[in-house]
Image (tube, rainbow, N blue to C red):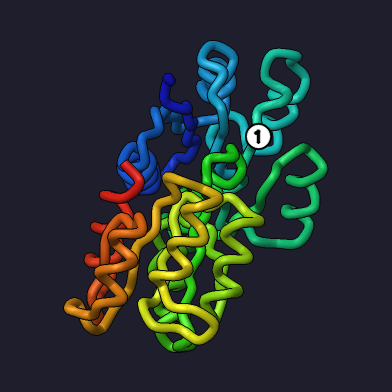
Amino acid sequence: MAAKRIMVIDDDANIRSVLKYRLEKEGYSVLLSGDGVDAVEKAKLERPNLIILDLALPRLDGFGFMERLRSDAETKAIPVIVLTAYRYEENRRKSLELGAVEFVPKPFSPRKLVADVGRILGLVRRVLVVDDDEGVRDLLVRLLEAEGFVVDIADDGLKGVDKALVHDYDLILMDNRMPGCGADEATRRIMAEKPGQKIIIVTGSPMDEGLERALKNGAFACLSKPFDVEDVRRIARECLR
């Protein structure tokens, strides 16, 4: 499948460079433009899947660009994220009236913006975190959301099984020992209904017999505590290849 094409329109070369790097790292093809007139022509020619648009542009501002985009039958449906230092409510209102799907004020988080792109294009991956330790749950949620995942949570094994059977998740991270049922039993129940589900067991005891049973029942891998962002990023990406 061809990579989704994202067009970044901003007169700030540094912002164009940062977003190009971030988006290409996620597998997107990136088009760049530094002024409104050039951007209109490129959008008509290339028809990107999504546009990230600054409002303050030379020759034709962001509002003028959106008006021209919407007046053309071939480009009017392209989703636009407005990215601007002009965070006034009037600019937000007008952007949305002209069809923008998001209004993002500067300064902004490149990671969150890339996650917004995936969400809007329907490419976001969903993860379920099952752990009875609130601190561990919160840490995993923060780390995973920073990587662009949409995260659901459950605080015991039975609730985790229920959610896993009702919803579709690209990945489940599950504590080895939980109230309700442990990871070995939870993995067995999930795999019986959804063979091939990717499950990572989070454990503070790598030699635990329950962990061994969970892996035999079909868990993909284990993540040992204590862990950091690189541990989570590495094992999640390995699992989702």
Most extreme residue toward the left is 207
Q: Where residue 110 sits: x, y (%)?
A: 42, 55
- Disc tally is 1
Label 1: how many Cα within 10 Å (few below 14, some 14–19, many 20+): some
Compared to residue 61, the image places residue 153 above or below, namely: below
The residue closer to the viewer here, 25 or 54, is: 25
Is any atom of residue 52 visible in this view? yes
Q: Quadrant of the C terminus?
A: top left
Q: Quadrant of the N terminus?
A: top left
Compared to residue 186, the image places residue 110 above or below, namely: above
Q: Callout 1, which amino acid?
A: Pro
Q: Is residue 9 left or right of residue 139?
A: right
Give residue 52's quadrant in the image.
Answer: top right
Is any atom of residue 226 visible in this view? no
Q: Is residue 100 left or right of residue 105?
A: right
Q: Which residue is mark 1?
A: 79
Considering the numbered disc 1 on the image, is that residue within a helix, a strand or a loop?
loop
Compared to residue 238, the image places residue 187 above or below, namely: below
Q: Which residue is drawn at the image coordinates 65% and 61% (left, top)?
A: 87
Q: Where residue 10 sits: x, y (%)?
A: 47, 40
Q: Which residue is drawn at the image coordinates 70% and 37% (left, top)?
A: 63
Q: Where residue 7 sits: x, y (%)?
A: 49, 31
Give residue 217's quadrant in the image.
Answer: bottom left
Q: Which residue is drawn at the image coordinates 75% and 25% (left, top)?
A: 70
Q: Is residue 183 left or right of residue 233?
A: right
Q: Which residue is drawn at the image coordinates 52% and 48% (left, top)?
A: 194
